Structure formats: C-alpha cells, structure tokens
Amino acid sequence: MELLIIPLVFGLISLILPSSWSKLIGGVGAIASLALACVHLNGFDPLTQTILASSNKMAFGLTFNFGYDAFGLVMVMLTNAIIPIILLSNWNRELANNKLFTALVFFMQLGLLGLFTAQDGMLFYIFWEFTLIPIFLLLYWFGAKENNKVLFKFFIYTLIGSLAMLLALIALGSSANSFAYADLKNVQLTQEVACWIMSGFLLAFAIKIPLFPFHTWQPATYTSSPMAGTMLLSALMLKMALFGMIKWMLPLTSEGIEIMKWPVIILGTIGIIYGAIIAIKQNDIKTLFAFASISHLGLIAAGIMLFNTAAWSGAVIQIINHSLISIGLFLAADILEKRSGTRNLSELGGIAKLAPRFGFWFAVTVFAALSIPFSAGFIGEFILIKELFNFHLIVGILAATSLILGAVYMLRSYQLSMFGAPKISSFEDLSWNEIAVFIILSLLILGIGLCSSQIIEYTEPAFRVLTENLTSNQQIIE
Amino acid sequence: MDALIVIFLTGLIGLFVGMLKKPMLNLLVTMIGLVLAFFLQLNNGLYTSPLAKYQVLEFNISQLYFSLLAIAFCMLIVLAGYQYFKRDAIHTGDYYGLLLFSLCGAICLIGFTDLFMFFLGLEILSIPIYVMVGIKKQDVLSAEASIKYFFTGAFATAILLFGIALLYGATGSFNLVEIRGIIQSGEYQPTFLFIGILFILGAFLFKVGAVPFHFWGPDVYQGAPEIVTAFMATVVKLAALLAFFKLFNGTFQDLAYFWIGALYFAIILSLFVGYLGALKQTKFKRLLAYSSISNTGYALFALLSLSNSAIGSLWIFLVGYGCATIALLTISMAIHNENDEISSFKGIGYKNPFIGFIMIISLLSLAGIPPLTGFFGKFALLMNAYPQHLYLVILALISSAIGAFLYLRLIVLSLSKDTDTESVAMSSWHYIVLGICAVGILGAWLVVAI
C-alpha cells in the first residue's frame, strides 16, 4: 500500500507548502517512490503474485484488492521511473517551481499506480477515471491559452470511452456478483455477450491508445499541452490502455477474441500506415511526433490482440521503449519550440551547428525511435512484426512498412530542423538537466535492448497465467 | 416522532425569538433544536417515546437514515443562510420558522404509513415553501416564481387528492399495508385504482420535478433566494423521492406492469431534457434547476428495481447530490452573485483555492466521476437497474456524458487564470458548510466500506 500512499502524501505536502519548496518535494517524492518500487522489485518472485491489500466484499460487490503480477510490477516500475525523469526534464523551467504542478504530477502517479495494481474491476475503473482529473487540470492550467476546445474534446472523448467500459464492467460484475478480478475471470460468457463486453472495453482503450478512427483528439491535445502534460499522456496514460487490454479486456472476455481479433488488428494496421503517412507530410514537429505515436501504438495494439505470450513479450518491451523515446522526442520538440519560437519545420534549420550537444542527443533519440539494433525498440518491433507475420502474411507486410516509413519521417524531421543553412540566429544549447535526461533515456533504451531476454523471461509466467483462459477455452472447443 | 415535535416547537419558538431581532440567538435556537432532533431520531427505537405513540408514523432503519439526512441538510442550509438572514433582520424569524415547518412536513413524508399522513406531510412541506419562494417581496422574479409555484403546486395537490380519493374508492383503505394486501388479493375496483395511481404518479413527478412536469423548476429555482433553492433542491426532493419510492416500490409494486411504462418515459425524458436544457443557460440557478431535473431522472432509477435493495443506493446518491448542490449554492451566496450570472464564477476557484477545490469536487461528483460520492450513487443505482433495464442504463450513461460536459464547462470557468475577480472574503459559516459538504462528497468510501 505504501506504493500508493507515498505519491498521495507528497502531493498533499506540495499543495500545502509554498511553491519555493516544490522542486525539493518533487525530487524527494519521486526518488522515494522509485526506491520503494525497486524494493518491491527486489523482493518479487516472477512466478507468483503479490497481494498488497485485500478485504472482503463491500457494498455493491466492490472489493478492496490490490496486488501485482510480474507484468503489473513492470508497469509500476515504468511509472515510478518515468515520473522522476519528467520532473527532471522540467527542473530548470518555471513549472517545476509551481506547487500545483508538482501536486498534480503526484496525483497522476497515484492514479497510475492504483490502476496498475488494482485487482478489482471497479477499482480499476475508479483509478482509470481518476487519472483524468489531474491531467485535465495540468493541461488546462499550464497548457497553451485558449485550448479549452481541445481539452473538452479530449475529456469528453475519453469520458465516453470510460462510460462504455463502466457498462461492460457492470455487465460482467452483475453476472459475477462481485468485481474482484478472480471472480470476474471466472464468469463464463457466451460468445455474443463476450463480444459486446469486449467492445465496451475496447472503446475506452481505443480512444485512449488511440486507435485509428478514434485518434482525432490526440494531435491537437499534444500540441496545446505543456511538455510535462504531453509526456504524461504519451509515456504513461496511453500505457494504461495497453495494460488494460492485456490484463483486463482479453483475459476477462477471451470467449469473444476470435471475432474481435480481426477488426482491431486491421484498425491497428491502418493506424500504423496512416499515422506514418500523415507524419511524413507534417511540418509541425509536435503533431509529427503525435502521429508517429499513433503509428507505433497501432503496432503494439495489433500485437496485443494476437493473444499469445510471445507477442505480449514484444508488446511489453515496446511499451517501455515507447515511453522512453516519447519522453526524449517531446523534450526535443519542446526545446526546439521554446528556444526558436516555432514548431514549424520549414522555419527551422541548421541548429546542429548552433547547438552541437542538442544535435547529438536529439540524433540519439531519433535513432532509438528508428529502432536500430541494440536499442529496445529493435527487439520489441521485431517480435511484434514477426508475430504479425505468423498471424497473417499481408498484415505482417503492412506492419513492417512502419520501419521504413518511420525512418522517413524521423530522419526528415531531424534533417529539416538540424541540418541545412541556419535560419535562426541563436540557439541556446542544452542545460545540465536536459543532458541528464537524454543520457538516462539512452542508457535505459540501450540497457533494455541488451537485457530484453531477461524482461521477456520475467514477464512470461504472468502472461501465461493471463492467457490460460483462452487455452482452456480452446480445449473445450476441441 | 419526538424529533418531529422538537422540530415543530423549535420552529414555533424561532418565530417568537425572531421578534427580538437578534439573528445570532435565532440561529442558536434553531441549531439546538435541529441537533436535538437529529439525536432523537438517531436513537429512535432504542427507547419508548413518552410523548406520543402514533401508528401513522413509523421509521424503519432506511427511513431513519433518510430523515437524518434531511435534518442534516437542513442544518447545513440554516448555517449557510445565516449571512443572508442577518441582512433581512425583520424576517429572520420567519425564515427559520418556515424552514423548520417545512422540514416537519419532510419528516412526515418520510415516515408515513397511511395516505392521510402522506397528504398532510406533503402539504406541510409545500405551503411554507410557497411563502419562502416569494419572500423577496420587492423582486419581480421572486413574486413570479412564488405565484407560479403556488398555482401549479396547488393544481398538482388537487390531482393528488383526487388520486387518493379514487384509490380509497377502489380499495376502501388508507393504510399502505392494507392497500397492498388488497391489491395482491385482487379484490379492487380496477378502473378507479388505475386512474388513481396515474394521478398520484403525475403529482409525484411534479413534486420531484421530473419531465414532463418540470416546467416550474427553472423559474422557481431562479426566483427563489439561494437558500430556498438549496432547500427545495435537497430536502424537498429527498422527501418527495422517498415517498415516491415507498408508495410505488412498496404499495403498488404488484401493479408495476401498469405504471412502469409511464415511469420509463419520464426517466428517459428527464435524463435528456435536463442536461440538454442546461447547456444553453446563462443563469446559475436555472442551470442547477435543469441539472437537478436530470439528477431526478437518475434517482428515479431506484424505483425500477422493484425491490427494497435500491434504497441504500438512493441514499448514497442523494448524499452526493445534496452535498454538491448545497456547496454550489453556498459558493454562489458567498461570492454575492446577486444577478445570478454564471460568468461571475469566472476565476474564483483560482483566486480562492478552497472554493476552487470545493467547486471541482462538487461538480465532478455531480458529473459522476470517481472516486466521489456522486459516482457511487449513480453506479449503485445503475447496478440495481442493470439486469432488467439494459437500454435505460445505456441511455443514462449517454446523458451522463452530456452532463459531464456541462459541469466541466463550469469547472473550467471557475478555474480560469485570467480574471478580474477579487479574492472572496467568506464568512466562517460558509467555510464550515463547505467543509462538511466536502466530507459528504469525499466520504462515500466509508459508507461503501461498511
């Protein structure tokens, strides 16, 4: 439980104390959470599950169950590692000196950790919705002015998705008479009902990821958000949906997988190509990265729908990798915007000469985003594309184009902004905290790329438990 | 029963204390009376009342909870209105007296076992409100609201009375248990009974302010002083809803096939008319009136379950709804929003973080965002209705999304950074009321955990 209490306490403290303290509180709180997560990691045996809290039934079938398996722990680690990086990248900015900002980041962390450790359907939903409040306030207070329209779109979109999920959970819970994860998993559904319930979940997740036709909120929200908001959204909030698919949607409604598999994989594949093509034509660098994100996540979502442990291992690595590179990319985009005054690629150029350190680290991030060998993305994308090939040849081929198209838009954005004749007179180079962020990210990406087999082995038992339902179902059918 | 007597006597004393023109004394008397009533009600059943033994008022456990809630809401309203009453020193006593008499009616309406008591309760509840709505005598809107409410209300009462008369004609009894027995045995006059039930249903829909009998709502809410609006939106609605629940879900349960269709119709319309109507409003109290129509639609889900299990859900829902409504109206009073414009909320939340916090949680609670009480209320009501009424639940969720948009606009407005509002100096009474409301809005966890 301390996992959840620490962010809550630090969030409240930073609300109470004056803003001059918030940097300190932010730093201490984030490091404390990370250290605690490491302690949990250290004492965890991947073959088991840890229960953090459990209690009997409460009113309306709710239970108060928290716990994690290996996959949940990986997500907890990811959250607790990303939050300090986000705070560090804001260290020299005015935001870090704002108590509201620090408090909201901690509340966000609380929501995410609760979501990743919830073992009860209603708790999952509660934390899912709860995260919406801090992110909304963050975007509203610290985002671009006059972004109300964008924010409303974002909020209402995600809320509609969540309500569909609520309906799905009510349907599941009322047949189980309880919302505890184990009880929900035991419910036997007919294929038709399972499809309906799965589409309820799917609407929520597809909007958040976002899958192809539900993505319209995303680019505008990314561009009008403050950097920290974009980072939280792309690095952590989208992962909630992917986590939800693996941990909640597919195991609970595995009866409907055979029917629902195709539409989602097709949408994911369309997203891969569509996102990449739009990104190639984009001149606004933040919008470009937003569409790149749609492209990357389409691949992960399609892979997850294959519902086998191998694809999920790839998905986990790609989830971690995408979190790391999106932080790097959006930091770079924000540095470009803040110091040159424009996000438009056609007005940028030659910055590598003015700011060589930035040029170098931006290049490193771009190469990581291209998934060159030895980076985490290489392993992740390779596994996912391989599994998609196994599933269907055409899907595999289409998914594999993401590698080529990705290279096109990433290199194009780098080339237009960094090389060529300088169009800007002066450009301040990186400050120490930004270099630190880039170094940490590169080391993590490299480290995960090299140790990916350990991560795959680590999460595999958990995935085997989660996919159990399907295999047993298939046996029944056979 | 003792609580009822205490409340009535306190109201009477309040009228006389009001002549001294010492608002503080008046507040003190009223609060002591209410606290006493609260504890008497809390201990109801643990001792035999020396004062009265009547068969027509009975409180079982769930009705006790509702009456406690009504008394608690009334306390909050009395506290929140102190500043307002003080300004109008001549009428302070009248306010307190009328509020308490109306509360008597609410308690009768919660505890009745007999249609006679039910009608008395409803009238005791309504008549003081007709007066209080028009208490701003110089204000045209207030007078208009009072007249409108009185005439429509009187008409609804007449229809209700007609319905009760027909019901008596059909079954030959006033007692709820007996009526139910007769309905179950089938020895009744069907035509009279059905018309009677339909009339009673119509009168109830009027009292709780559900579509299609909602037209009085926005005008009356807007014309009445904030404090009376708060009373109408919480205590009156609570009492009427409980009576509705008791009569239809209890007594007429076996005739559900007959009235449930009409209720369906009313719920669907309420859910959408309320929120869609609220979208275009520029006056704050009008907006609240429309949103309360939709909230009534949600509360009526309790009647659909046709079992007593929904009563707990209704209670939690009303806690969330009532606390949020009182908090919002208190804020509106605290910022001296005389002309009732929504735009005068701009930026107050950012200027005054406490108000901002209360605004956020109460509006999000109304919107049904977890982990606030409003969410648990809606969730529990939908959970109860889900197995039989899937499509209604889907419609409710859709309307909930519209509502969220509505409330979100208010949140955004009040948290806006660029503003020319000066920071608000609130009286300590308002802080107390808002603090208690915040506990109510955040405290659902405790109830759920029990």
Image (cartoon, coloured by chain):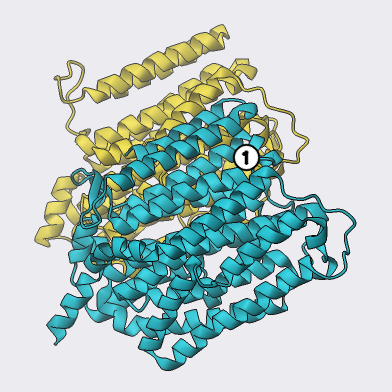
| Residue A203 position (above or below residue A438) | below
| Residue B159 position (above or below residue A28) | below
Element assignment for label 1: helix
Q: Nearer the viewer, residue A407 or A249?
A: A407
Q: Is residue A12 visible?
A: yes
Question: What is the quadrant of residue B100 in the picture?
Answer: top left
Question: What is the quadrant of residue A456 in the picture?
Answer: bottom left
Residue A188 position, x and y percent, is 18, 71
Residue to which mark 1 is pinned:
B223
Q: Is residue B399 left or right of residue A291?
A: left
Q: Residue at x 36, y 21 (%)?
A: B7
Q: Residue at x 57, y 48 (%)?
A: A86
Residue B90 position, x and y percent, is 61, 16
Residue B53 position, x and y percent, is 17, 24
Q: Chain of mark 1?
A: B
Q: Which chain is yellow?
A: B
Q: Residue at x 43, y 24 (%)?
A: B75
Name the amino acid, label 1.
Gly
Q: Which chain is cyan?
A: A
Q: Nearer the viewer, residue A79 or A310?
A: A310
Q: Is residue A450 left or right of residue B188?
A: right
Q: Residue at x 15, y 22 (%)?
A: B46
Q: Is residue B238 visible?
A: no
* Quarter of the image with the N terminus of chain A in it: top left
| Mark 1, other Cα within 10 Å: few <14 / some 14–19 / many ≥20 | many
| Residue A55 position (above or below residue A287) | above
| Residue A301 position (above or below residue B140) | below
Q: Nearer the viewer, residue A118 or B34?
A: A118
* Quarter of the image with the C terminus of chain A in it: bottom left
